[in-house]
Image (spheres, rainbow, N blue to C red):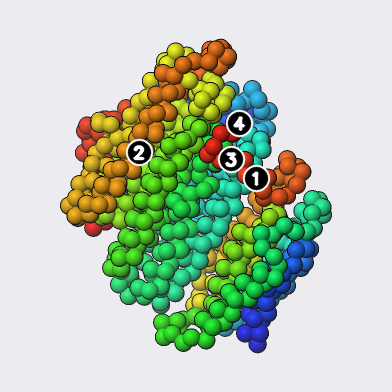
Amino acid sequence: MINAYIILFGLTMLYLSTTSRLKAHIRMLIAQGILLFLICTTSFSHCTGGLIAFLTVETLLVKAILIPWFLYKVLNKTHSNRDTDANIAHFYCLLISSVILFLGFLFSTIHIPSLSMINPMCFSIALSTIIISLWLITIKHKVLSNVIEFITMENGIFLLSLSVAKEMPILVNIGVLLDVFIAIYILGLFVSEINSEFNDLEVTHLSDLKDCEYDD
Amino acid sequence: MINLVLILPLIFCIVLFFAKNKTLNNILIVLYALVHSALGVCYLINPQIIQNNQYFELNSTNLIFYLVLSVVYLAVSVYNIGYSRNLSLKFNNGKMALYSMMTLAFVLSMTGAILADNLGLSWIFIEGTTLASAYLIYFNKTKHSIEAAWKYVFICSIGIALAFVGIILLTIATGNLNSLNYNDLINNASSFSHFWLNVSFVFILFGIGTKMGLAPVHFWLPDAHSQAPSPISALLSATLLNCAFLMILNMYRVLISANCLAYARIMLLLMGFLSLFITSVFLYRITNYKRMLAYSSIENMGILAIATALGGLAYYALFIHLIAHSLIKASFFLTSGNILELFETKRIKSSRALGQIDRKTAWLWVICFLGICAFPPSALFISEFLIVKTFLMQEHYILCALFLILLTIILYALAKVVIKMVFGEKSQEKYELAKQNIKKITISMYLPQGIMLTIAFILGIYIPKFVDIIIRNSIFY
């Protein structure tokens, strides 16, 4: 069952790389949050009760409800629903993401003795998610979609930490939470600041600082 | 006492939040700087006085980093008295209180990152430094500062997230050990899986290297350092980069104990030389003097990475370089703050004839330059000399030549700018503006640089016994 959730999680990344509507991106974030919650509840047989409670509540509350709600708010405030001018056409985008995901699957089928401590499916999909997110960040032009990709990367890292079959120190969980805090708080605030200062959320406006002559 | 240093700034922040008083801002910032240095002095007198708690400890490894932070922060807090007086002419009390609160939070998170004895905890505090300093970079609320802060937050967050991946991979490498405490890691390192240890080091090096400003992941650094208010630039360059470096160094110690250094050394050498190369290329046609200093920081971080990779004698050079670079670079940035107050621009072309306008600032600017370029008796001369010696002892002749060539190009580029700014022809309009602004610069904006430079130059001639002992204790053979 858990593998089905993980595969679904990987597929959300494919959808993210094909659509340009930011609302759909946020919906996918909700889906990822719920899937992570399900993976959390099914995969933790080796942990203590308190830790599971903390992790599950944190994922459901923060990843599936709080962040998407916050992003919706920013989206409504800035009225920019589409990220049209990606550097690469959607078809190729889908193709490359699929290849990365497929390589992840292939990796999970290879049996390596030193990998006995990790869940291979979870590990490889998490790695593919991180790579796809990083790659999407480089080709998207809207600040908000960069933020969304950053959060999917965080989700990927979270999945990676779930793939290690040993009890993580509680500090690591606090770390994940802090990252999420960065994502919504600072990035969210900056998005609205950038929007009010530049009247638009294009990353291309943010290229004034450079090493040749500029007025400062 | 450690608890006091970590809790005091939080109390001060609450007081500042409610008081919103300009004088109180400065008093509390200086007071915290004094308490901060008091802890270091107490440790020097008798290490037993300091009660380490479960998560934070002051020990021989992080003592140098802590002392450097204390001294630089004390100097910056004194400089800040004059600087914030000029700043408060532009901004209201609420904003100035926020500035001071964020400065305290920034120093607190750096202190936490240095004192933490646990990889996870250092990571959290490094993340905290991003949160606190992002606001400070964005303080002027211009288009440029938004851009710089955005790049800073975004690039550093991604870097730190990658470092987190490194920590997760490290937990795979550690096998049955369920702890991220540095001592536990070092003591059990021999049983770790070498493959996973190497992979995790690559992630941590790239992730935290982003924060440290190593090329090729340095892109945020020139923007952020040039846009932040000058005291903050000084803190960013002279202390924040060190905090990130300490984390890499601690991880490197684990690798030493595990006896798998080959890849790590190559990575560090590669990033170090790339940093030197990038600096020499970009400095050559630099147009903005604060960016120039930022690139120079990248260069020096590169030198630290190279010294770490070389090992042996270079470890001693590493710590001398760290101390001297922090002191000199902080003075350099603070002096650049004076120049910015005078000319109201960061362009090199428009800020000339400094020698005719403000002799003290001009002298500081020249001495800072001599210090950073490792002119004897600057302590950087000793460190760079020892690094070159290590290169020759280990028979890396080509690398040694490359190192010297790149340093010479950087020296030439810096010298060109500094000479142009101090002795260049004046433009009448800027000259009159600067003459009017000269009253803005108070004695507290010269003194800290003078003291830090004196220390850096004295260290080049004579290294006191206690400094020598501290450095020898920090070295890990």
Residue contact between numbered discs 3 and 2, judged by CB atoms under 8 Å: no
Chain containing mark 1? A
In this view, the residue in front, B215 or B46, is: B215
Chain containing mark 2? B
Between the C-alphas of marks 1 and 3, the distance is 8 Å
Q: Position of residue A166 (x, y in %)?
A: 49, 77
Residue B463: quarter of image: top left
Between the C-alphas of marks 2 and 4, the distance is 27 Å
User: What label does residue A209 carry, if any?
Assistant: 3
Residue B328: quarter of image: top left
- Residue drawn at point x = 36 percent, y = 56 percent: B270
Q: Are labels 1 and 2 assigned to the same chain? A: no
Residue A129: quarter of image: bottom right
Name the residue beneath numbered marker 4. Answer: A215
- Residue drawn at point x = 19 percent, y = 55 percent: B394
Q: Amino acid at mark 3?
A: Leu
Mark closer to the chain start, 4 or 3: 3
User: What label does residue A206 carry, if any?
Assistant: 1
Name the residue beneath numbered marker 2. Answer: B409
Q: Is residue A126 left or right of residue B296?
A: right
